[in-house]
């Protein structure tokens, strides 16, 4: 509170999934989503992908009302905890999500007969709640895929009577979906098979998957047809103009309004690299500094060094701490490559390591370490076999660390 009794509340929202005070840019991505909503027969589903903190979750949140406005139903969840998904749990997941939309729908005797349960466990009429859906699932003969399809088809036969454009299944953090051949569990393939099959039958149920850049390669690895089944939208850092908006627009809303000087704004754009999470983080710190400034009219100096140090400890340090010494050494070599913030190859690392460190890395060793590092979520392999950092601005962080150590 200041002397006039006004409570300042910091408008910026650094935090996973926190809606920013002003969602900058993303117009072409939103338009693309709008285009997919116009499909009567689903030929394309959506993959929304990008690095951590780039704004996938909040953009997905803004898609929901757009879809509903356009006459779609929307169900879905966050799959962060989905590491151990089996075919049964993905089935339960789908039925659970579906039942949110369908539980108020009552089906009569005719439908029940038509599905073939007339003389069995289903008394009529009854609601398409979770219990009914799972009963239909259990009673349908065949594999998990057949069972899920039977449920989805029944649900659509009811939904279509109710002026629905279709139904969207939105799954966040979907890079966690994977098949486990060793355990003979193929939940990801199951999901893809089911949607491909019902979409072929003209049922307008669309998948919207968001996740890290490993997501799409993983889908294609499970089922090659996934290549054609998804429109991939890659969310990138904001350009300079959009970054500026993300920084200054929230200030217009605050009372009394304050202003960041032009060169401060430029400095935030540069230090954040246009990455939305970093913009929110730096701006929140800056705002607090401005609010604490004792003398009016004085322009506070920007403590960018301190802010970056805080960012290092809040955002990067945990990930860095999990790497071994030798892995860090490898990452330091990578951070020395001019192209490290875009992509890099095994060969480039091998070559630079010869001039840079005492015990250089060999090709197969680099390959092996990059694959361990990608499991740890620090790098990922793109579709052309090149690698990139899986954490934005990791190169600069590593260089800052090296300077500190030097
Ligand atoms: N377009 C945007 N403009 C401004 N801030 C954004 C934008 N997109 C995301 N953010 C902010 O960035 C942070 C990360 O967003 P989030 O959706 O959690 O990223 P992701 O899901 O890709 O990891 C949040 O603090 C959010 O408020
Ligand atoms: Mg997210």
Image (cartoon, rainbow, N blue to C red):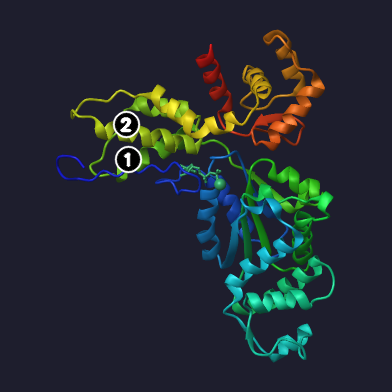
Q: In this view, does 259 lie above or below 324?
A: below
Sequence-first disc among 2 and 1: 1
Residue 357 image position (x, y, % from top left): 68, 11
SS for tag 1? helix
Q: Is residue 362 left or right of residue 47?
A: right
Where is mark 1, residue-wise?
251
Where is mark 2, residue-wise?
260
Q: Can residue 380 be seen in this view?
A: no
- Is the residue marked 2 within 8 Å of ligand 1, measured from its CB? no
Q: Categorize mark 1 by other alpha carbons within 10 Å: few (<14), some (14-19), many (20+).
A: many
Q: Residue furthest left?
A: 4
Residue 284 image position (x, y, % from top left): 37, 37
Residue at 78% over, 47% down: 220
Q: Is residue 11 above or below residue 81?
A: above
Q: Give the quadrant of residue 167.
A: bottom right
Determine whether label 2 and label 1 are within 8 Å by CB: yes
Q: Categorize mark 2 by other alpha carbons within 10 Å: few (<14), some (14-19), many (20+).
A: some
Q: Is residue 163 left or right of residue 297?
A: right
Seen from the viewer's position, the closer of residues 373 and 295 is: 373
Residue 264 image position (x, y, % from top left): 36, 26
Q: Is residue 362 left or right of residue 36?
A: right
Q: In this view, does 200 lie above or below 78?
A: below
Residue at 82% over, 53% down: 183
Q: Which image quarter is the N terminus in?
A: top left
Residue at 15% over, 40% down: 3
Q: Can residue 320 be seen in this view?
A: yes
Residue 275 image position (x, y, % from top left): 51, 35
Q: Give the quadrant of residue 265.
A: top left
């Amino acid at each position: 509170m200041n002397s006039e009794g006004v409570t300042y509340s910091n408008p910026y929202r650094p935090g996973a999934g926190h809606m920013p005070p002003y969602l900058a840019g993303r117009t072409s991505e939103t338009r693309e989503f709008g285009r997919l909503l116009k499909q009567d027969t689903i030929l394309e589903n959506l993959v929304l992908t990008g690095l951590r903190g780039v704004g996938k979750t909040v953009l997905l949140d803004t898609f929901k009302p757009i879809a509903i406005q356009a006459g779609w139903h929307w169900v879905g969840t966050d799959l962060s905890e989905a590491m151990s998904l089996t075919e049964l749990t993905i089935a339960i997941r789908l039925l659970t999500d579906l039942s949110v939309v369908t539980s108020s729908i009552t089906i009569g005797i005719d439908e029940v007969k038509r599905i073939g349960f007339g003389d069995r466990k289903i008394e009529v009429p009854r609601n398409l709640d979770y219990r009914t859906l799972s009963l239909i699932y259990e009673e349908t003969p065949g594999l998990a895929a057949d069972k899920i399809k039977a449920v989805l088809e029944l649900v659509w036969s009811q939904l279509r009577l109710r002026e629905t454009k279709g139904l969207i299944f939105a799954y966040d953090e979907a890079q966690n979906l994977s098949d486990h051949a060793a355990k003979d569990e193929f939940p990801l393939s199951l999901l893809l098979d089911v949607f491909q099959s019902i979409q072929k039958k003209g049922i307008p149920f669309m998948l919207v998957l968001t996740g890290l850049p490993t997501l799409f390669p993983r889908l294609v690895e499970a089922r090659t047809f996934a290549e054609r089944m998804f429109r991939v939208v890659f969310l990138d850092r904001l350009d300079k103009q959009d970054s500026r908006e993300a920084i200054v627009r929230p200030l217009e809303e605050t009372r009394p309004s304050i202003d960041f000087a032009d060169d401060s704004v430029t400095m935030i754009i540069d230090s954040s690299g246009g990455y939305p999470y970093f913009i929110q983080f730096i701006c929140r710190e800056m705002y607090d500094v401005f609010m604490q400034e004792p003398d009016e009219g004085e322009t506070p100096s920007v403590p960018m060094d301190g802010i970056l140090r805080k960012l290092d400890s809040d955002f990067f340090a945990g990930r860095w701490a999990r790497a071994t010494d030798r892995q860090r050494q490898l990452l330091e070599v990578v951070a020395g490559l001019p192209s490290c913030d875009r992509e890099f190859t095994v060969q480039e690392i091998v070559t630079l390591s010869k001039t840079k460190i005492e015990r250089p890395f060999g090709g197969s060793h680099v390959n092996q370490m990059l694959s361990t590092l990608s499991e740890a979520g620090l790098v990922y392999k793109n579709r052309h076999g090149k690698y990139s950092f899986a954490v934005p601005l990791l190169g600069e962080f590593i260089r800052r660390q090296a300077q500190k150590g030097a």
